[in-house]
Image (spheres, rainbow, N blue to C red):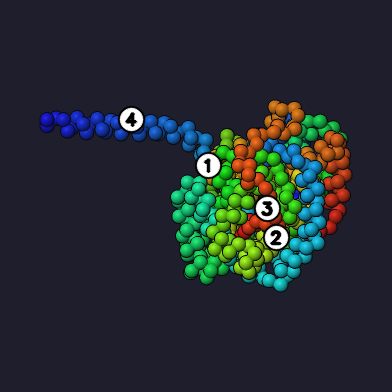
Amino acid sequence: MALAVIAAGGVSAAASSAHARASVETPIPLVAAPDAASDMAQIEYDPLEGFNRGSYAFSMGLDRAVFRPVTHGYMAVTPTPVRHRVSAFVYNLGEPSTFLNDVLQGKPKRAGRTTARFAINSTVGVLGLFDVAAGMGIRSHDADFGQTFGRYGVKPGPYLYVPVLGPLNFRDGVGRVFDFFTDPIGLAGQGWTSPFGITRLVTQTIDTRANADLAFRALDQAVDPYATARSAYGQHREALIREATGAVQELPDFDDVPAATDPVAPPPETSTVPAESATPQPATSEPAAPAAPPEPQ
Amino acid sequence: MTNAHPTRRFAQLALVALVGLGVMTQAAPALAQGQREPQAEQFVQTRAQRVISVLADKNQSVAQKKATFHQGIDELADVPRITNFVLGKYARTITPDQRTRFAAAFRVYAESVYQNRISDYHGETLKVTGSTVRKPGDVIVNTTISGGQLGQPVQVSWRVLGGGTAWKVVDVQFKGVWLAITQQQDFVSTIDNAGGNVDVLISQLQRDAQRPASR
């Protein structure tokens, strides 16, 4: 039950508990299990699977050779509270970008909360080291260009595993490029090649990888880690987009006979993002998280 | 002239009342679908917290924890239903013999994953924050888990099926990811790539269960 750990994030025993035991002696339902429903088909839309699997294998090899040892070294020499401070610091630097997308999504309340968080945490919270705002009830939320596109109806399009960068789909890949070039902190810090930019990129990379460590461990225990990462990423992203649209998730009935006989995912509508921006970029503001949905804090 | 005001006021009142009624009748069906289910909430609060507490209990040996956890899981989760669900479309074509072997292998596999993670739990507490009735007998219970080594509280949702006081968890969601759904896609992909042969999945589960924790 590898996924248990992705979900658990090391946390909820609960998570693994839901699945953790299959009982042999209990009578088994004779109806077929439904294939996870229609919006799942969209997540599973993977016409580039051949390339993606190769890219996934390459990225995981690179992770084992470079990112994992570095991250585990970092985790070995820093106590958990210190890593939480680093995560908070990195996260705070992302708030202006969140604000930008809150505004683009037409969500003044969320934009206001983001502004308040950035103002409070950057000052009282000592440059973002402490999330004082959350203590005051102003909780964080994420926003990025992929979500903004989704907010206006853009579908995810084909799944894409970009070497080193990790799981994406066309919509969120384009979104990632936009994120990179519009990030106010990145622009203020004179791009990622400046000393500040490089420091931030490295810190963020290690922090993201450390936060995703349990997810990586979980993937190791999946039977098909590639398919597991694809599913988890897609669900995670669609949940973020539902957060912006207010849509309610359609779930499969848990034990009805599925209507469809063949489970091959029908190609969903492809994304309609501008074509000129569709080039994957070598570096983004959230690099090197080849597996699970990385979530600062 | 003097009558005009009361009349107008009455008209306004009537309008407000009408609109109000309209809003209420509109709201009523929405409420029916989104209403809470206190008994399902109570079930998750008690049972899920118990499982979490067992894992964090420093006074119990690992063996004791496993045993208590094992029992807690049977009380908490609808294991046969989940076992069926994770097979996806192959739940229809699997032979009874394969089904028996799969159920056994899945159980052992899941158990071994959990055993490798026993040290990850440190006294987290679970608090139910609400629930949504999808349809009668199918409820999403929302919880917040905090404490332990968590930097921030995390939101975890539980899909519970049942009725009255008898409920069972069939899926758990964290950061948008449903575990059983993801597990289903993992397994179905594996069987697909084996040309539809469920035995390949079963033997891989058996092999993985014997593998020690990777790190």
* Image x and y of residue B5, in percent: 17, 33
Chain under callout 2: A
Q: CA distance from mark 4 to mark 3?
A: 58 Å
The residue positioned farthest toward the bottom in the image shown: A77
Q: Which residue is mark 4?
A: B18
Residue A102 pos. (x, y %):
50, 50
**Callout 4: chain:** B
- In front: mark 4 or mark 3? 3
Circle 3 residue: A281
* Badges 2 and 1, same chain: yes
Instruction: Decide if residue B207 is on the left or right side of residue A38.
Output: right
Q: Is residue B170 left or right of residue B64?
A: left
Give neighbour class at mark 2: few <14, some 14-19, many 20+ (Cα, 10 Å).
many
Q: Label 1 marks which chain's residue? A: A
Q: CA distance from mark 1 to mark 4?
A: 28 Å
Percent x, y of residue A128? 54, 66
Question: Residue A209: which disc?
Answer: 2
Q: Do circles 1 and 4 both sit on a common chain?
A: no
Sequence-wise, the earlier of marks 2 and 3 is 2
Q: Are marks 4 and 3 in contact (CB under 8 Å)?
A: no
What residue does disc 1 label?
A246
Q: CA distance from mark 2 to mark 3?
A: 19 Å
Hey, what amino acid is under mark 1?
Answer: Gly
Residue that appears at 48% across and 32% down: B29
| Foreground pick, B54 / B23 | B23
- Tell me the kind of residue under disc 4: Leu
Q: Identity of the amino acid at label 3?
A: Gln
Mark 2 vs mark 3: give the one in front: 3
For label 3, count other residues whose C-alpha is less than 10 Å away and answer few (under 14), some (14-19) or many (20+). some
Residue depicted at x 66% and y 43%:
A170
